[in-house]
Image (tube, rainbow, N blue to C red):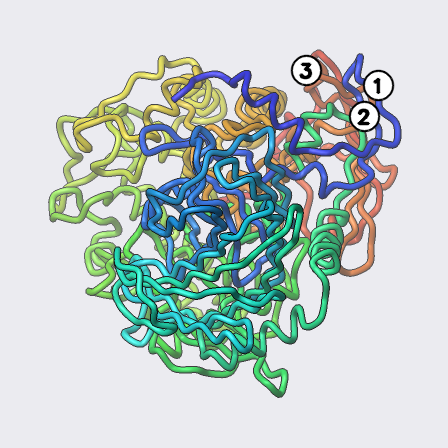
Amino acid sequence: MRIVSKVKGALLGLSIILSLSSCNETVNNCLQVEDPVDYANPLMGTDSEFALSNGNTYPAIATPWGMNFWTPQTNKMGDGWGYQYDAHKIRGIKQTHQPSPWINDYAAFSLMAVTGDLKFKEEERQSWFSHKAEIAKPHYYQVYLADYDVNVEVTPTERAAQFRFTFPENESSYVLVDGFHQGSYVKIIPEEKKVIGYCRNNSGGVPENFHNYFVVEFDKEFTAINTWNKDELTEKNEVEGYHVGAVLKFKTSKGEKVHAKVASSFISYEQAQLNLDREIGSDSFETTKQKAHTAWSKELNKIKVEGGTVDQQRIFYSTLYRVLLFPRKFYEYDQDNNVVHYSPYNGEVLPGYMFTDNGFWDTFRAVFPFFTVMYPELNNQIMQGLVNTYKESGWLPEWASPGHRGCMIGTNSAVNIADAYLKGMRDYDIETLYEAILKNTESYNKEVTSVGRYGASYYNELGYVPYDVGIHENAARTLEYAFADYNIYKLAKALGKPQEEIDLFAKRAQNYRNLFCADNKLMRGKNADGTFQAPFSAFKWGGAFTEGNSWHYTWSVFHDIEGLKQLMGGNQEFIGMLDKVFELPPVFDDSYYGFPIHEIREMQIMNMGQYAHGNQPIQHMPYLYNYAGQPWKSQYWVRKVMDKLYTPTPDGYCGDEDNGQTSAWYVFSSMGFYPVCPGQPMYVIGSPIFDKVTVTLPNGNELVIASENNGKDNVYVEGLTFNGSVWDKNYIEHDELLKGGLLEFTMSNEPNKKRGVGEEAYPPSMSIE
């Protein structure tokens, strides 16, 4: 992989159409974005591989939170890196539900066009393509299949899509419907110009009766049909097996367009047909495309940015697009327009909402806090879905795709629930969710140990998960459980639970103290007998920690930075430790893994010391100077991260994007604030990059964030006012933000070492609440 931005990234200019009302390219300063959809680049982050992630994304052609995405497929079936920017050939356009290459895909099938001699095996049928003849937008994808002289386009709805194939003159033009491996079925119905089928491929987290049923309707008669089973072509119009597919043959004239309308359902063929009829019906390709564009325009226009550079505007809308993809709507509308879902937990079709494809270990940090600001109605629906998940599986999800998956650590579902409730979202059964939260604190799912609390009995008895009892990532678990306990404490208090219960979780929220080693001023694994792990290296990844080391996880005391600060010895010692993160060389000990995992390599090559922005645990850390009287250092480092580690190109991220989290960090930070501590309804101040941001809030209010004298070198906040009043605090409350108004920054190229330095300016912490 490459360490620096590639020249080939410049080719994206052919895939991104700019619409600027006032732009001076000489100074690279654009006043206003006319159509933010044209700025969102689905190819950002796609130049990734197992050894090095520049996002680990794929071009998700979808509507916001759509049940189905579509993406070009460059790699073989089952490869988590389904689309890689460096690839030269495309095997098909597949329906995908993949949230991460590490979790992989499920319910995938594809359509592919070929001409001439029939090639249906994926290795044989793949066609050369070029990014110069490719357009990728959130609502539309087009690619030229050079080997077949066919242009393919796709545009989506939430549960359906339209394809348009532009063929050459040919007696033998084909569309292939590939049901993929792990069990599939197709039936061709020539008199209806239709194919129905199902696919069952998955990577875990599904009940036995799991199917994705699909229907494909064409607007042109077939001149011949075939099916295939494994590697054998058959004359049958119906086939079922491990890997089957359908071949539809057409006679085409030059430039002839063949259309296909596609929809799917996790419930039945009938529901798939209903989804197709409801979401597309008689609409033309262009109508569906315009509707998909409108869906994205509606959401992206809720935050309008002005000023900054063209690249910053592209990054902003590309990252905002990513924030609005997950969690996935895993529900459908029945014939009476009732919300129903196939349960990925018990296999039944049940009423109500269901969402999936999310790792709360990542997204509790900024994605769900973003929803509390911009999408409270959606967040209410997600909470209703969590109620259904608990009722159907007996557990809250921590990593779902589509059902429970064994990935990552923590009980961060509690954080999302508490944060939503404490910020006023109440349209769900909070008592059932509270019951589920309490169950999590006492036990874990022995079949999927990432669900519940692995090591709960140790944690509850000793106040930490010991290093020497065979539970990996024990220190990280302790710190994350303690933060979840803080949120439970706040929620219990808001719900009027018994004082004994409130006090219990308040006490457990302080368990982070049990792992603080005064000798190192860092968090450290601790044995069951109370002694610290030995030997100890702060540079060792894994072991006591999750995809990180002590320099990363020491700051995972989101709720009580004041307490952590005092453990370190006060403001100066705390600031000194923060400084060290950036000053130390990017050395590492990879002995736990046996090789440098990609997160290690991404930290090493970015040349920001031990700061590892490509992985989530440390992403809030640059904001912590605000808690110790040196907010200008937060301003400097936050801007440094935005300027250095994000670009609107295929290698545009510095690590895994992860369901919108690394994107949400940029979206918040570019506006000038960040939710350091979900569960505390406030946002810590940073350094905005745009001259003006206009946020249309869901309550109808408008928040304008203006920055005077902003620029590349003017990263420091000289002064801040809110609705005309001087704002000296280093944070702003959630309720104040929702009132709207004018938040106005005055920027400078020199730090203001008098503003925000007193204790009264510090963001809240549990120790001083």
Q: Earlier in the sequence, mark 1 or mark 3?
A: 1
Q: Earlier in the sequence, mark 3 or mark 2?
A: 2
Q: Which residue carries the number 2 mark?
A: 30
Give x and y (percent) for residue 339.
Answer: 57, 79
| Mark 3 Cα shell of 10 Å, populated few (<14), some (14-19), many (≥20) | some
**Would you place residue 291 above or below residue 351 in this image?**
above
Disc 2 secondary structure class: strand
Query: Which residue is tagged 1?
Result: 24
Mark whose residue sits in front, 3 or 2: 2
What type is the residue that disc 2 sits on? Cys
**Mark nearer the viewer, 1 or 3:** 1
Q: Which residue is mark 3?
A: 751
Asked whether the residues under the numbered discs 2 and 1 touch, taking CB atoms below 8 Å apart as contact, a structural biologist would say yes
In this view of the protein, which residue sits in the foreground, 373 or 598?
Answer: 598
Circle 1 Cα neighbour tier, 10 Å, few/some/many (<14 / 14–19 / ≥20): few
Provide residue 581's location: percent of width, then percent of height: 41, 21
Residue ID at (52%, 40%): 145
The residue nearer to you, when weighing 694 against 212, is 212
Q: Position of residue 765 (x, y in %)?
A: 52, 43
x and y, in percent, of residue 725 in the image: 85, 37
